[in-house]
Amino acid sequence: MSDQEIDRMREILQDGFGRRVDYLRISVTDRCNLRCFYCMPKGGVPFLPSSQILRYEEILKLADLFLELGVKKIRITGGEPLVRKNILFLLQELGKRKSLEELVLTTNGTKLHELAYGLLEAGVKRVNVSLDTLIPFTFLKITGIDLHGRVMRGISEAASLGLKIKVNVVAMRGVNDQELQDFVRYGIDKEVDICFIEIMPHAYNSGVARDLFIPRREIFKRIKAIFPLFKTGEAHRRLTADVYGVKGSEITLGFISALSHPFCERCNRVRLTPDGRLKTCLFGEKDLDLRALIQSQTEEDLIKKEICLAVRAKPAKHNLKDEWGNLAMHRVGG
């Protein structure tokens, strides 16, 4: 790629297939206070030493570079982002960036009741809560920890403050598939959006993911059997989800189907791992060590050039149909 091509890409970050990249997911930690069986093995996982985790000032510097390259939306993820010390500082600083149109967060909800007001004050526009069951016993079975009531309280607290809430549900056969319709009822009752997600295979769940997997068409069929659904104008904004409305309510239902209905041609995102590696595809093998570039005091223009080159090489699609994932999901943020 020539310097002239790099210059043309500075305002609009675009890959080699014409996809505009304007969405950055930043995983601020690989640690989590839950132990969901489909995410982490019973024996635990090796966590990164704190010395390898990006400092907040490094995250902010990289975020500014991506904003200069045309990123408009940043999502903070983990692990569980709210377990990182002084996380509100980072969110407050990001919220001050005038060119950032949307600051959002994904959390397991266990600390949401404590931090909901701080998130709102920091400028967080929407919170996605990962919640796979409405039943306390099933929550304990999935996560290994009895914090269901705290999560439900956090959702209610955040919604009452005016934060836009979306509940993410990983649909799993024999685990929570009998609750799919109940989640829609819950969303209507609490006025929160719901998103159903196909389980994604990775290094720590390959032994069970195939048995748990429910394709999008089955999830959709079960819900449509009871609830009248219609396509909404949200679809053009949520590029990786098919979005429907439920007649008689204000909520939306999203369906994310990375395996059965890949959305790679619409992908507009890249990811920054806790140790500063840029991943242009969730399941891609190549990454760019941005932490090393920052710590070596590489000039900002050169770092942006490397980012452009990495995005330019973003693969056309993932390879999950051929091999069932080998990444550590808790380090990438999904």
Image (cartoon, grey):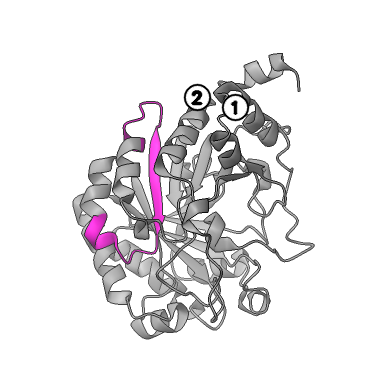
Q: Is residue 247 visible?
A: no
Residue 129, percent from left and from top: 38, 60
Q: Callout 1: helix, strand or loop?
A: helix
Return the x and y of residue 268 as percentages of the image width and height.
58, 39
Q: Is residue 102 magenta?
A: yes
Q: Is residue 95 above or below residue 253?
A: above
Which residue occupies 25% across, 55% down? 115
Residue shown at 46%/66% (left/top)?
169
- Viewer-proximal residue among 64 and 197: 64
Q: Residues within 10 Å of mark 1 (few under 14, many from 20)?
A: many
In primary-sequence order, the first of circles 2 and 1 is 2
Residue nearer the viewer, 305 or 250: 305
Left or right of 5 in this view: 122? left
Q: Residue at x 36, y 29 (%)?
A: 97
**Residue type for callout 2:** Glu
Dots 2, 1 in contact, CB < 8 A: yes
Residue 165 position in % (x across, y down): 33, 54
For label 2, the SS is: helix
Most distant residue in the top direction: 4
Amino acid of disc 1: Lys
From which residue to which does the magenta span run?
94-115
Residue 11, located in which quarter of the rendered image? top right
| Number of marks | 2
Horizontal side of residue 201 vs 114, given as left or right: right
Q: Which residue is mark 1?
A: 304
Q: Residues within 10 Å of mark 2 (few under 14, many from 20)?
A: some
Q: Position of residue 57 (x, y in %)?
A: 41, 38
Q: Which residue is mark 2?
A: 68
Give the quadrant of residue 197: bottom right
**40 is higher (above) or lower (below) than 167:** below
> Of the residues tagged 2 and 1, which is closer to the observer?
1
Quadrant (top left, top right, bottom left, bottom right) of the C terminus: bottom right
